[in-house]
Amino acid sequence: ETGVTQTPRHLVMGMTNKKSLKCEQHLGHNAMYWYKQSAKKPLELMFVYNFKEQTENNSVPSRFSPECPNSSHLFLHLHTLQPEDSALYLCASSQYIAGGAKNIQYFGAGTRLSVL
Amino acid sequence: AQTVTQSQPEMSVQEAETVTLSCTYDTSESDYYLFWYKQPPSRQMILVIRQEAYKQQNATENRFSVNFQKAAKSFSLKISDSQLGDAAMYFCAYTWAQGGSEKLVFGKGTKLTVNP
């Protein structure tokens, strides 16, 4: 248990559905991240939030919409997805300190998403 | 561009033996960290070990140690006295601070099998 909880663990949705992934961290961290993990590809960073402000959008299509209402919660809203969006979506958190790359990112167990 | 390369898609080791997983990276940054993460079938990404680029001494965590060759941009992981619970995907990762957030770049991973 790393202190980062993701729900649901599995999600199956049609291309016209709207769903949301949830991430909650209990570590008191100030930065949260969304990653996409596809088969045979490296993990891809999607979004970064520092102090609830989005600081990184790695050219992610607009059908993925992140939301960070506070430092402990992060959502990924999904709508009109494509079958190629099927993947494991991982959330992570860290305690970001400006001025250096010091911080360990702690990961949740991910949501396995299947788009039909 | 920062990249991480893991040249061994799969490795196997006998229980109680030693195995080394290789990783190379490419960067022009001077301040960065390197990590090895483990992802068992439970999907939870767990930090195994980290190395600070400015430290010459190789990091060690119990049975896990690294061989960090900064000039060669090489960062291999040695697992001693391998145990069945070490079976997992192992990801090498690199991070640096840019633009107010920290980016974590992963390799494609090495699947480690431990044979009894």
Image (cartoon, rainbow, N blue to C red):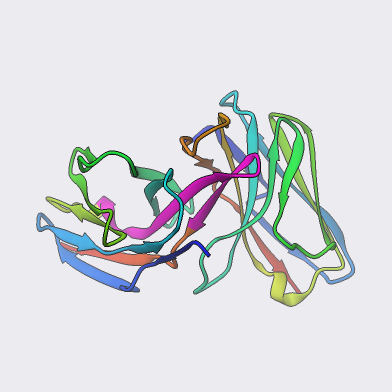
Location of the C terminus of chain B by quadrant is bottom left
Is B111 above or below relative to A52? below
Residue at image coords 39%, 50%: B37
> What type of secondary structure mainly makes up the magenta span?
strand
Residue B101 belongs to the span the image colors magenta = yes
From the viewer's side, name the closer residue of A49 and B15: A49
| Residue A82, image quadrant | bottom right
From the viewer's side, name the closer residue of B96 and B16: B96
Residue at image coords 32%, 40%: B54
Q: Position of residue B74 (x, y in %)?
A: 28, 60
In the displayed orientation, state which residue is furthest to the top: A28
Left or right: residue B23 versus residue A9 is left
Residue at image coords 43%, 54%: B93
Left or right: residue A44 versus residue B14 is right
Q: Position of residue A27 (x, y in %)?
A: 56, 26
Q: Position of residue A42 (x, y in %)?
A: 51, 66
- Magenta residues span B85-105
| Residue B100, image quadrant | top right
Residue A72 belongs to the span the image colors magenta = no
| Residue A78, image quadrant | bottom right
